[in-house]
Amino acid sequence: EGEDYSDPEAYPTGAELYVSDLAGGNVEMITDNDEYDAEVSISPDGQWILFTRDVDGQLDLWRMRADGTGEEEQITHTPEMQEGGSFYLPDSETILFRAWNRADQGQRGMPMTIFTIKHDGTDLRQITTEEGTNWAPYPAPDGKHFFFVKISPGFNFEVWMMNLETGEQRQMTFSEAFDGFPAVSPDGQWLGFSSSRQAEEGTRQTHLYLMDISSLGISPAG
């Protein structure tokens, strides 16, 4: 109460993770603390819940067992960086995420970088090396590609695809509107994303779009 959430340092304390069935029933709270817990995803094998936790203004990645047993485990320990937006790759061990430097926090077009890390906190790797905003990464089911958002000149948000092994990039959307929040179907046939290309003038309205990406050959291995 009384918090100013326009302040980039202010995250809602007491934000918790919940689980429910697909109809919205059987709701159960699975974290219980005074911190900010959010940006949650689950490993493809269903064993791990992955999320971001804010402790005293410091964002890090955490994991916990999907059945609620065991300890909540901190994955990243980087006082100078703010991690979040994380997803497991198909191996249910490697994590794809974005981070920004705390010194850059709050600025327009905030620089962000995409990394991978093993969920035991080892093998941290920087994936994007270019300057600017590299944001909202989402893994493809082949384990070799991911989709993410870059800000082009003119402050234009576009969706791109990148090969984790070669670093090759391919632009997927071409619009002067906002295109972001990519997600890929489990079979690798469809790319979903949000776009403001049909928004009424003067609004920030977005709609969901689907793109047929079956020709990209990013279906699950085997």
Image (spheres, helix red, strand yellow):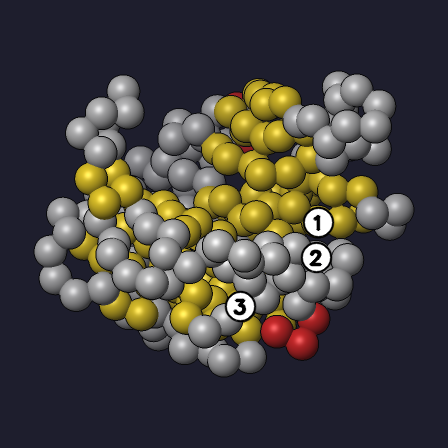
Q: Is residue 47 visible?
A: no
Residue 103 in the figure: left or right of residue 147: right
Q: Which residue is mark 1?
A: 150
29 relative to 12, above or below: above
Q: Which residue is mark 2?
A: 133
- Quadrant in which the C terminus appears: top left
Q: Which sits earlier in the primary sequence, circle 1 or circle 2?
A: 2
Nearer to us in this view, 94 or 218:
94
- Which residue is farthest left? 69
Percent position (x, y) of residue 39? 43, 49
Give me the C-alpha separation between circle 1 and circle 3: 18 Å
Mark 2 neighbour class, 10 Å CA radius: few under 14, some 14 to 19, many 20 or more? many
Residue plotted at (83% across, 33% down)? 176
Q: How many marks?
A: 3
Residue type at numbered disc 2: Thr
Q: Are discs 1 and 2 less than 8 Å apart at CB?
A: yes
Q: Which residue is mark 3?
A: 82
Percent position (x, y) of residue 62? 33, 63
Q: Quadrant of residue 2?
A: bottom right
- Which residue is farthest front? 2
For mark 3, give the secondary structure. Answer: strand
Q: Which sits earlier in the primary sequence, circle 1 or circle 3?
A: 3
Residue type at numbered disc 3: Gln
Give me the C-alpha separation between circle 3 and circle 2: 14 Å
Mark 1 neighbour class, 10 Å CA radius: few under 14, some 14 to 19, many 20 or more? many
Residue 191 in the figure: left or right of residue 206: left
Q: Are discs 1 and 3 less than 8 Å apart at CB?
A: no
Residue plotted at (22% across, 34% down)? 27
In front: label 1 or label 3 = 3
